[in-house]
Image (cartoon, helix red, strand yellow):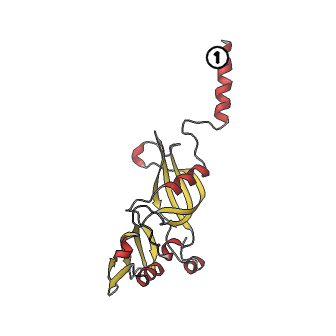
Amino acid sequence: MAKAGLLFPFTFLAALSGCDQLGGFDRTKALDILQNTELPDTSRVPIKRSTVDCLLNGGYLTTFMGASWTITPNGKAFINAFDYNVFGGEGFLSFAPGAKLADAQVTGIGPASQGPSSGAATSDAVKQIEFTAHYDLSSVSNGASAPDCLTTSPATAGKAIAKKYDDGWRIEFTQLPPIVDASEQKQGTIQ
């Protein structure tokens, strides 16, 4: 009986010290995962007109009457897909494989909903990460320099979900940071 009485206080102290089966999840862990995860080539990165103009002027895109868009061979080194609504002033692009986040800063971590079909509203194995970042395209093409408008955008806000699997945490981006220029960010046109 004396041995069992000593085991309970040890277990309680281990729980208080932050030990858990998931190995902990904090801002350092979230940042490491964010910066080491390649963006899926199907990711939709929000863009504004300034980015379209930069890509057109740099020879990465061509347009026919502003309605249809073609990614040039130079553009295909960095851009996998492109869609822009001239009338709405917004669009999306997908980077070629190898793109990552750069200069990410984690601004918050909290519980994430797993959806109505999961049976539980939240779990220690699913976390929402809020962050700011811009993009690193240095691994995307074979030594070609990426257009400045894709890599020097001010850091903007994004969101991701981290899920714990048997081999570690994996990330799913739910809102990628938009690509903007400094004037758009100062005018408060982006969040």
Q: Quadrant of the C terminus?
A: bottom right
Q: Residue shown at 39%/78% (left/top)?
A: 60
Q: Quadrant of the N terminus?
A: top right
Q: Residue at x 60, y 48 (%)?
A: 26
Relative height, residue 151 to residue 108 (above, below): below
| Element at label 1 | helix
Q: Residue furthest front?
A: 143
11 vs 179, left or right, is right
Q: Quadrant of residue 92?
A: bottom left
Q: Callout 1: few (<14), some (14-19), or many (20+) C-alpha neighbours within 10 Å?
A: few
Q: Amino acid at mark 1?
A: Ala
Q: Label 1 belongs to which residue?
A: 4
Q: Report x, y in % for residue 22.
A: 54, 39
| Residue 176 locus on image (x, y percent) | 48, 64
Query: Which residue, as the protein is rendered here, is positioned at the far top?
Result: 1
- Residue 137: image location, x then y, percent: 47, 66
Q: Quadrant of residue 49?
A: bottom left
Q: Is residue 19 above or below residue 49?
A: above
* x 46%, y 81%: residue: 54
